[in-house]
Amino acid sequence: MKNNSLLKPGPLAIGLFALMAVLPCQAQDSKVSKEREALRRTQTALKSAQEQQAGLQAEKARLEQDKAQATAAVGKARTQALGLAAQLKARDAQAVKLQAELQTLQQTGQEQQAAAQTRERELQQQLLAARREGAERQQSAQAVSRLLERSTLALADAEGKNRQMHSIAQDLVKRYLSRTPADLTGIGDPLFGLTDIRLENVAEELRGKMEQQRVN
């Protein structure tokens, strides 16, 4: 009876046997779980890497597009800058040309102004000379007019005196022709001599009148 009790397993032995039977199964399950977890993590990492790669590709495409746009913009700006530089150069040349034309016009205007001033002075001098000449001619004309007036008056006076002398001469001739025989007889009377005296008085009177009418 005693040997049979030794051969019969006890509860501890049964527990150990059960634990030994379970441990391999648990170890196998743990290994599978770890592999699955590793696979899941790998898949997650791969997915994340793929997403990052896709993002990087999109970022690269965007950057390349931005670069292309920037390059195009730079080229356009360079072209515009070259065009602006050419325009500025042309405007500078135009400004230099206009400045030269302005200086020429100013010089021409100054020359024309100087010529106009010279011409104005010449005309003023000619006008003054013409005025002086006109004044001198007017004075000469006035002098000639006065001389002509005096000559006219003198001529009229001379003509009047000539007419009076002609009248006196006619009166003398008339008196001479109207002498009477008594006048002729009394001329040589030595006693009285009245006729001679009267004739001398008449002659003196006529001489005085003629002297008054003599033209100076």
Image (spheres, rainbow, N blue to C red):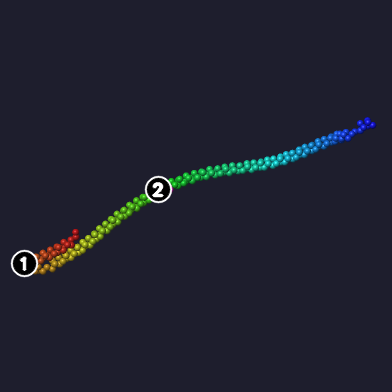
Using the image as rendered, state which of residue 114 and residue 28 is in the foreground: 28
Give the residue at the far right of this rendering: 1
Q: Is residue 57 above or below residue 192?
A: above
The residue under the point 58% across, 44% down is 80
The residue under the point 79% across, 37% down is 34
The residue under the point 16% across, 61% down is 211
Q: Quadrant of residue 137?
A: bottom left
Asked whether, in this view, residue 143 is left or right of residue 21, the answer is left
Asked whether, in this view, residue 163 is left or right of residue 24, the answer is left
Magenta span has 110? yes
Q: Main secondary structure of the magenta part?
A: helix
Badge 2 element: helix
- Quarter of the image with the C terminus in it: bottom left
Question: Which residues, given as a range, are shown in magenta?
Answer: 108-116
Which amino acid, by three-letter code, is at mark 2? Ala
State the residue position of label 1. Answer: 192
Residue 99, horizontal then vertical, whole percent: 48, 45
State the residue position of label 2. Answer: 114
Magenta span has 42? no
Which amino acid, by three-letter code, is at mark 1? Phe
| Visible residue check, residue 22 | yes
**Within 10 Å of the Cα at label 2, are there few (<14), some (14-19), or many (20+) other Cα atoms?**
few
Q: Between marks 1 and 2, how big is the CA–CA gap? A: 103 Å
Asked whether, in this view, residue 181 is left or right of residue 52, the answer is left
| Visible residue check, residue 57 | no
Badge 1 element: loop
Residue 62, horizontal then vertical, whole percent: 67, 42
Using the image as rendered, state which of residue 9 and residue 21 is in the foreground: 9
Residue 31, horizontal then vertical, whole percent: 81, 36
